[in-house]
């Protein structure tokens, strides 16, 4: 019995390489598609146009209760300041930071794109409001403590670290 010649197998490999090369070229030319943001099934454009009553029905029970009891003077003042900061911004630039102590303020769609300085007990942490943050509290994005770094030399670590100068 005679096996097929190696020349024909080599030519098949060349054909296979050529088709794979065109597939790779097609894949590199395709534009990358980004995931479209939705909040509970509502697109970002529709979310920005939704009324406060409709938005209230979309959020969690705790936030719904807070909105139902009414936004007080300070949260409404913050929203007004954010509106003014957005209006006074030139095109393609970020708005000015608006400082606040209202860590319990729920992020609403109107705040998207704003920069808020959230007080953490010591300083104001700048937070840029993104669409993914809708429905969360402002305080969730400004940590109030310094995380512990275990095992570092310094005060009270070990006897060998006694000679390391403390800053």
Image: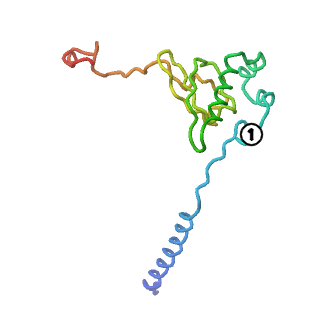
Q: Which of 47/58 is in front?
A: 47
Question: Hey, which residue is sitting farthest top in the picture?
Answer: 156
Q: How many marks?
A: 1
Quadrant placement of the C terminus = top left
Residue at the (60%, 44%) spot, across then down:
91
Residue 127: horizontal and vertical position, in percent? 55, 29
Question: Hey, which residue is sitting farthest left in the picture?
Answer: 163
Residue 130: horizontal and vertical position, in percent? 61, 36
**Element under disc 1:** strand
Specify whether 153 is left or right of 107.
left
Residue at the (65%, 35%) spot, across then down:
87
Mark 1 residue crowding within 10 angstroms, few (<14) / some (14–19) / many (20+) = few
**Does 55 sit above or below residue 37?**
above
Residue 160: horizontal and vertical position, in percent? 20, 18
**Does 9 sit above or below residue 65?**
below
Specify whether 133 is left or right of 7.
right
Q: Which of 74/48 is in front?
A: 74
Residue at the (56%, 38%) spot, across then down:
94
**Residue assigned mark 1:** 42
Q: Which of 16/146 is in front?
A: 146
Residue 115: horizontal and vertical position, in percent? 57, 31
**Does 37 sit above or below residue 64?**
below
| Colouring scheme, one of rainbow, by chain, secondary structure, one colour | rainbow
Image quadrant in which you'd find residue 23: bottom right
Image quadrant in which you'd find residue 57: top right
Q: Which of 83/140 is in front?
A: 83
Image quadrant in which you'd find residue 92: top right
């Amino acid at each position: 019995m005679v096996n097929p010649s190696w020349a024909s197998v080599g030519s098949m490999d060349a054909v296979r390489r050529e088709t794979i090369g065109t597939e790779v070229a097609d894949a590199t030319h395709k534009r990358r598609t980004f995931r479209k943001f939705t909040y509970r099934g509502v697109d970002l454009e529709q979310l920005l146009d939704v009324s406060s009553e409709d938005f209230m029905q979309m959020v969690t029970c705790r936030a719904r209760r807070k909105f139902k009891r009414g936004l007080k003077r300070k949260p409404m003042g913050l929203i007004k300041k954010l509106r003014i900061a957005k209006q006074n911004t030139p095109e393609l630039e970020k708005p000015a930071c608006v400082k606040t102590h209202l860590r319990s303020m729920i992020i609403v769609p109107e705040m998207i794109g704003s920069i808020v300085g959230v007080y953490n007990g010591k300083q104001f942490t700048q937070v840029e409001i993104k669409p993914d943050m809708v429905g969360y509290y402002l305080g969730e994005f400004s940590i109030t403590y310094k995380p512990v770094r275990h095992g570092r030399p310094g005060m009270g670590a070990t006897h060998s670290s006694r000679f390391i100068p403390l800053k």
